[in-house]
Image (cartoon, coloured by chain):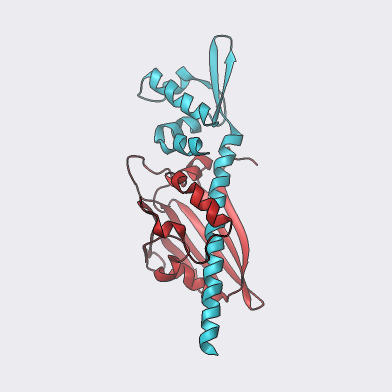
Chain colours: A red, B cyan
Amino acid sequence: MDATTESTTVERTISIAATPQTVWEFFVDPEKLVRWMGTNAELDANPGGIYRNEVIPGHIARGEFVELDPPHRLVFTFGWEKSGEDAPAVGPGASTIEVDLTAEGEGTSLRFLHRDLPNVEAAASHAQGWDHYLARLEIAGAGGDPGEDPWLTQEM
Amino acid sequence: MEAALKAIAAPRRRQILTLVRDGELTAGEIASHFDVTRPAISQHLNVLKEAGLVNERRNGTRRLYRARPEGLAELKNFLEEFWDVRLQALKREAEKEERRKHGRNH
């Protein structure tokens, strides 16, 4: 893995047993978004509209919607508001997330791409302050309690 | 891992990492890029070294520093793991919602 040069990208493709329309709503409806990420979201799902989500208490992701083709393709920018004394290496709107939804039988193939992370150091700063959550992340990664976001109940 | 996360939480240390990403530099050369004391730079370099993010190499009386790709890769893995966990949560929730919709229709 060449992690020292060029921009950093995270790309994933997963299959979901739900229609593209259902999956789409989990990106543009604040109430549904926080069921899988963050605690407090403000979304204006129109080109140029705001994307703001308190992903971790005290750590707010912010960007704006760029492209919306429901329920097929969604592009929005993504970065971090300043928190504490350390300025984020990836400022609000500095990186880009692309989501492509393709019908697959009765389900959906979801392609997720997080790109334009300037380099891996900046990418790592996305993890800034997240070290407290490592243990929880591992629990969630091992299966966790379905539907429950351990961060929702975490007190800072 | 935790040491690496703490190490990169400081903007100055991220700047130092960027400087030594593509080539070796001495502490003095690194310090010349910043308006801070040489001991402060040495301390930052120690933190980065202990976190496994930079390598130190002695060449005669000089010490040369360079970013350690494996250390940076670990951080990239962390970011990937973050999205893996989030996307699995999305899958669970969307599938639950889909079942709920069908239950209502029947």
Give residue A69's position: percent from left, percent from top: 51, 72
Residue nearest the observer in this picture, B58 or A38: A38
At horizontal 57% and vertical 30% (from top left) the residue drawn is B22
Q: Position of residue A156 (x, y in %)?
A: 35, 50
Q: Nearer the viewer, residue B97 or A144?
A: A144
Residue placed at 36% from the left, 53% from the top?
A155
Looking at the image, is B83 positioned above or below residue B67?
below
Residue A50: quadrant of the picture: bottom left
Pick the front one: B76 or A8: B76
Q: Quadrant of residue A144?
A: bottom right
Image position of A52 with respect to A134: above or below: below
Q: Is residue A133 visible?
A: yes
The image shows residue A5 at horizontal and vertical percentages of 58, 39
- Against A55, is A32 above or below? below
Q: Residue furthest left?
A: A85
Residue found at the far right of this picture: A105
In the picture, the quarter occupied by the C terminus of chain B is: bottom right
Residue furthest out toward the top: B61
Q: Position of residue B101 (x, y in %)?
A: 52, 82
Task: Give A127 or A138, whichever is nearer the viewer.
Answer: A138
Horizontal side of residue B103 vs A53, given as left or right: right
Name the residue rendered at 34%, 46% in the picture.
A83
